[in-house]
Image (tube, rainbow, N blue to C red):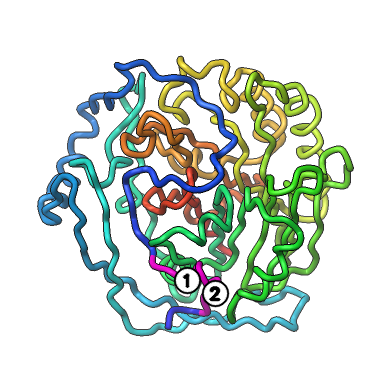
Amino acid sequence: MVRSSFSFSGEGSLVIEEQVASTCVENASEKTEAETSSDGNQVQNVPVSEVGELQRYKRRLNHLSVKSETVIGYSKVATKKEKLSIESEDLSGQKLLGTRKKTSSETINFDVKTDDKVAEPWTVLAHKKPQKDWIPYNPRTMKLPPLAKDTQFLKLMSWNVNGLRALLKLEGFSALQLAQREDFDVLCLQETKLQEKDVEDVKRSLIDGYENSFWTCSVSKLGYSGTAIISRIKPLSVRYGIGISDHDSEGRIITAEFDSFYLITGYVPNSGDGLRRLSYRINEWDPSLSNYMKELEKSKPVILTGDLNCAHQEIDIYNPAGNKRSAGFTDEERQSFGSNFLSRGFVDTFRRQHPGVVGYTYWGYRHGGRKFNRGWRLDYFLVSESIADKVHDSYILPDITGSDHCPIGLVLKL
């Protein structure tokens, strides 16, 4: 058995599928997206600098014998990671991780569904105006190797699930298999869309290993927003919101304190159709969250993860010119992201590790967004500068479907 794992009972106990075609789920995301012209339906040609990467990728495709509109199966060898030994009663946090013990390997079978000749569209550079040195993010080749077995570390994951109940009802999804494959220590969720009456049932469904879970729901608008932290490790403390009533009624922030850092799962308000909440977002929310993080940072480093609803640079969005006044890519939001977070000492871990890499975490359901990899990078791990060098890997998992966002991960050395 792969370390202690997490699942939900009942309708949620299904099997993971790595899908390329967009999967429609209940409750459309609140993201807005500009219309794309007909010429926007074509993926940009890949510069010469990416030819070597694509040739290696094509050779892998030949081995897989992928054909259009077919379902293929392949085996992936997943080394069982060592079982985590945690003294949950030791709240001093002196030892978050125990020894990782080497175990044998097992084969896990996954199905890949594709209705396009490219089985992994994120491995092909898709951008309206790519620069010559940009390359696509390929987790198969760009995720860093695991740390040495005697190195202590934490593996954090974050995912905007766009409705947790809808995700768990999807045929082909298994939270248990996701936990086995990724072997995370802490999972942060956004846009759960749960109501308070649903939380206890969900918490009772957690199996051994992830008993520590913390949930907050919107009380101003039911079935909206909502965040959660699910953890193997018992936090030293947990707080909900940022202490400002005007911001805390939508269930957007949970902070878990661990021995060496604070972890915040955040779902930043979308500026909305017609940018109706843009002023609130940049003049009230962003400064308040930034000040909250800086106050926490006085005692220990801070990690903010989640859907921050901003594609910060042109490299972070497929069609920058067509989205200048779209929520999530306005000049005002991008400037606010820089001034309130990056300029105040918080590091965008993925962009620091991959400065010229195009990697998206959100794809709209229109225009074949996921099929052609026309997306946005809206999900982040921001960390205090003081622990930036402890980040071993910051990565994206574009193959995991079930939401209009995909999960992201962070491996942090302790």
Quadrant for the N terminus, please: bottom left
In the image, what residue occupies the spot 48% across and 39% down? 362
The numbered mark at residue 9 is 2
In the image, what residue occupies the spot 76% across and 48% down? 218
Q: Is residue 230 magenta?
A: no
Please indicate, yes or no, whether residue 223 appears anywhere in the rendered image: yes
Left or right of 118? Residue 85 is right
The image position of residue 164, as x and y in percent, is: 58, 56
Left or right of 93? Residue 165 is left
Q: Is residue 9 magenta?
A: yes
Q: Nearer the viewer, residue 223 or 66?
A: 223
Identify residue type, mark 1: Ser
Q: Which residue is mark 1?
A: 13
Left or right of 21? Residue 218 is right
In the image, what residue occupies the spot 56% across and 44% down? 27
Q: Residues within 10 Å of mark 1 (few under 14, many from 20)?
A: some
Identify residue type, mark 2: Ser
